[in-house]
Image (tube, rainbow, N blue to C red):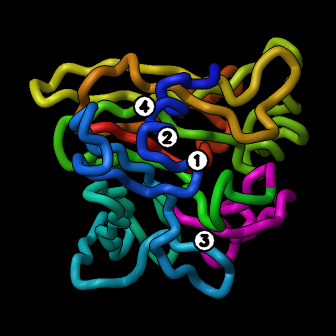
Amino acid sequence: MKTNKLFGLAVLACGFALSFTSCTNDDNPAGGKRVAKISFENKSLNDLGFWCGEVNDKGFDNGYGTSYACAYQEQGVTFNTTYSVSYWSGFAISNRTKTDFTIGDFTPEGMPDQFNNVTGKARTGQNYCVIQTYGESIDLGGEVTVNGFWFTNSSYTANAYLNGDGMTPGKFEKDDWFKCIITGTKADGTKANVEVYLAKDGTYVQDWQFCDLSSLGKVKSLSFAFDGTKKNDWGVTTPTYICIDDLQITE
C-alpha cells in the first residue's frame, strides 16, 4: 500500500498530472513505451448507477438458469463479467455516491448498495470498478507491466467488518483480517502474487490507497481472490469485494 514512484514518473513523462488516459510512443519518444490509465469512464450505467452485465446473445445454462458472458473494454484491456437476473460476478462499474449499505434480495437490482464504496466517490472522474470474481479475470491484451491501481473497500464488506456478515458470528475484532490476493499470469503460464489487506489490526481501509503491482513483471492477465479470518466450512464469509480505480499499465 505504498505510493508508487513509478506511477508519478510515468504521469510526468506524458506531460499530464491526473487527467491523461494514454500516451503513444510519439508522446514518449525517450522511453518508447505506451502508458495507459484505465479509469472506467467509457460505460453507460443504469438508473441505479451501475453496470454488471446485460442480457445478450452469449447466454449459457449454468445449471441454475441462463447466464450471460459480458465484458467491459478500455484501451485494449478486457474486464470479463458474468451476468444473470439473479446474480453477477466479475467486474462491475459504478458511479454511486452512497457510502452506507442496506441488505436486499442479493440480485443486482435488488441490492444496489453492493456497488457502493466507503469513500462515496471514484478516485478520479465519476466511475470506479467493483470486483467480485468467481474465476473471471482481466485480460490485458498481451504481456504488459502493470504499475498498479488504487483500491478501497466496498460498503458491503465494510458493513461486515462493523456488524458481522450474517454467517460467521460477530464483527471484526483486533485479531481479524481480510485481504485480496492479486495474481498475474505470464505468457508461459507462470504466476506471481501481490497481497493487499483491506482490514487488519482493528481497522479497515477507508480511503483510496495505491497497490503497487510492478513486482509481478510482465503479465497477460490479472485475477483476484480473497482470504480472511471469518470462515465456515465453505470458505470466507466476509463479502469478497474490492473497489479499484485508475489501473495503470506500461507496454
Instruction: Say if mark 1 contacts mark 2, CB within 8 Å.
Output: yes
Q: Between tags 4 and 1, which lies in front?
A: 1
Residue bearing the label numbered 1: 17
Instruction: Say if mark 3 contacts mark 4, CB within 8 Å.
Output: no
In the rendered view, would you say 65 is above or below 177? Answer: below
* Residue 82 place in picture, x, y as percent: 38, 64
Instruction: Say if mark 2 contacts mark 4, CB within 8 Å.
Output: no
Q: Main secondary structure of the magenta part?
A: loop
Left or right of 112? Residue 138 is left
* Alpha carbons under labels 3 and 1: distance apart: 39 Å
Residue bearing the label numbered 4: 147
Q: Specify the amino acid type for callout 4.
A: Asn
Left or right of 108? Residue 221 is left
* Residue 6 place in picture, x, y as percent: 47, 25
Q: Residue at x 60, y 45 (%)?
A: 241
Q: Residue at x 59, y 40 (%)?
A: 150
- Report crowding for label 3: few under 14, some 14 to 19, many 20 or more residues within 10 A (C-alpha): some
In the rendered view, would you say 150 is above or below 191? Answer: below
Left or right of 184? Residue 88 is right
- Residue 128 appears in which quarter of the rendering? bottom right
The boundaries of the magenta stretch are 92-119
* N-terminal-most mark, 3 or 2: 2
